[in-house]
Amino acid sequence: MAAQAPSAPRKLFREEAQTGAINCPACGGPIELHGFGAVEQVNCPYCGSELAPEDSGELELLQAAQRARRSSALPLHARGSFPGEQGKPEEFEIIGIMWRECRVDGVVYPWQEFLLYNPYIGYRYLMFTMTDGSWAIGQTLDGAPRLETGFGHRKVTFAKDKYKHFQTSVAIVSYVEGEFPWQVKVGDQAVAHDFIKPPLSMSIEEAATEDGQDVNFTRMRHIEGAEVWKAFKLPGKPPRTSGVAMLQPNPYKKGRAITWVLLAVMLVAWLVAAIAYVDGRTNKVVFAETNKTVSDTISEEVEIGKKGEMTTLEFDLRATGLSNAWAYTEVMLISQESENAIGFGATAEEWHGVSGGESWREGDQTPSVTVGKVPGGKYLLQITPSAGQQGSAANTPPPNLKLSYSLKENVVLGRYIALPFVIIFGFPILFWLLGRVYEGRRWANSDYVSTSN
Amino acid sequence: MMPAPDPMQEQQTHCPNCGAPAPFRGTAVSLVCEYCNSTIVRTGVDVKLIGQVSAIVDNGSPVILGSRGRFKGTPFEVAGRLQVQYGRGTWNEWFINFADGTTGWLADAQGQFAITRPKNQQVVAGRVPPYDQVAINSTLTIDNIPAVVVDRRAASYKGAEGILPFEAEPGMRFHGVDLRGHKGEFISLDYGTNPNHNSPVPYLGEAIALVDVGMHPLRSFKGWRRPAPQGAAGRAQQPAG
């Protein structure tokens, strides 16, 4: 290189960067190079030999290997489009494939990592978890998460998202194929701390080399296998999924905001309907008798509601003069039209005493019975009372017992109000429970399993 | 759109080695001759020949000398490149001239980019640990910005092209620490060749995507379509069709 001026400047890198094709120096297999100059290492897809591109453009054989090629979920050099940060589709090519695995309680959990590349955008990682068939896509974070200090579950925060620690594991490289912008060897180990906020995760991985140290923050997002298949325009269907993946969105939490809005709307509607319902009741007394004794049997004709309409009846019993005694009335309503009978009973009672130095008193002396769906019409009302006392006077009615009866139509039936209330709350509670069960299945694979063996 | 003309009057200098024009601009100290690879250093009104640098290796960067963009409203142009080598590969530090006469750096490593500007050493002097005591993944507060140490390593200058603000001797080993803030801030601490002190030169800025700063023109890559250039305002324009 003597001191002579060429006729034109070299204009470095103004020419188009070329892809390459070369034969593996170990096995002779044809290797396509699509990673341009950024590549630090190439692993022959056929034999696995580790090759390093030299400044001259040749491939230097670092380590010969004779491993068999594995069939990964996606092929090397496939191109796919994924929505970018602004939603515009961004095209990437798979230039490297790496299989990694971790061991938890002696069980091996393998996954496949696809290195996606676009020379103008950079790299993305696409992960396929082989044990549950789930997918995630992500990239190195342009920032650093904040470690939450304090007690409780370990958390990190980034961009207002709070991620909970899920697991810390040692990931081991088990298979490499294609091009990588860094050196990667089978057997390489890395400690990864995974924090999750489904469908997002934040992975913190520290690495050390002879000339320095670094820490990498990788944010991943759950993606459906079908979306991956669509992105790469692949025929057929993605591998089946099973169980609950680490980042799988909880379907029971999906509509949580809507569920609460719906709940609020339904509660308002319920309240309005309940008020209208209560307001619309007449509570008309169709029969009333007071100060009857236990020997007074009543048999009287009453007119209930309107013919052809249903009504709700309330029978009230009021007993006075009960002292460690009971009074029971059997009530029969016999329809004058259909001869159908409606029967029910009401018990009034009063018990008291002293036990353990404390006096006590219990029993309802004014019981009510509500009967729904009573057809309107003429009825024969029969009331047959009976009564008794504690101890030896079991079959003797209390001497001062007086009984009062009233029968009201068109009263409020409590269950008409309560039932919708139960249903309205039942669904959110059910979804909440199912959501908890779902989270339990997710976290069963984490470092935080409540059951130990 | 174009960076403003150089605030300093341009001197017509020539490469002492091959006689080709050596277009020093602004405060540039060092220039790699585009014709013969010689490193030329400006000393006062004179130029001095340092020797030939080892050629830059093609590490696949989409950035080229002359690429322009706009960072926080200020247009800039790429004037030079320093290529740095460490154990696992290379990265690029692109020297950029802003239209307002200031300078900065565009870091370019494994598809991740950041633009920084040098700050006064007083900002960190005595407030950061010496290089050897900087713990990875620890948080330091620099110029009131809490930032996490993400990278700490020694690296060597491998090669250069274009103009640079200092004399970069190939093979020179320097020590650097990179930090990332919680809001995308990017900070580099340059401890220089001797790591045993606590007043590195700080470079403050933020992580960027090339498309977001409207970087153009970019290198072409076989089989890939270049992203559509963006408008002067730095906004994405709909490509025709």
Image (cartoon, coloured by chain):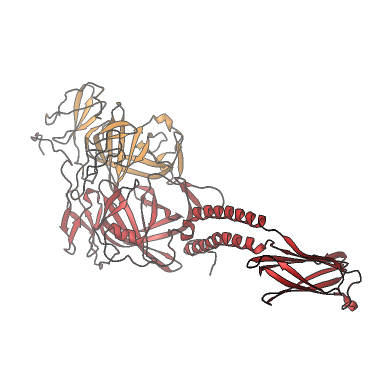
Chain colours: A red, B orange
Residue A231, relative to residue A160: is it above or below? Answer: below
Q: Which residue is more in the foreground, A271 or A299?
A: A299
Q: Is residue B189 visible?
A: no
Q: Name the quadrant of the C terminus of chain B.
A: top left
Name above or below for residue A247 compared with residue B24.
below
Query: Where does the image place residue B93, in percent across and percent down from the top left?
Result: 28, 39
Q: Quadrant of residue B30?
A: top left
* Whether residue B174 can be seen here: yes
Which percent across, then down, holds residue A39?
24, 51
Decide which of A184, A31 is in the foreground and name it: A31
In the rendered image, the vertical position of residue B22 relative to residue B215, given as above or below: above
Residue B37 spot, x, y in % from top left: 16, 36
Work out which residue is located at the far right of the displayed protein and give it.
Answer: A399
Quadrant where the image shows the N terminus of chain B: top left
- Asked if A398 appears above or below A284 in the picture, the reply is below
Position of residue B160 measured from the top left corner of the image (x, y, whole percent): 23, 38
- As drawn, is B161 to the left or to the right of A335? left
Q: Residue A219 or A346: which is nearer the viewer?
A: A346
Front in this rendered view, residue A401 or A18: A401
- Tell whether A213 sits left or right of A147: left
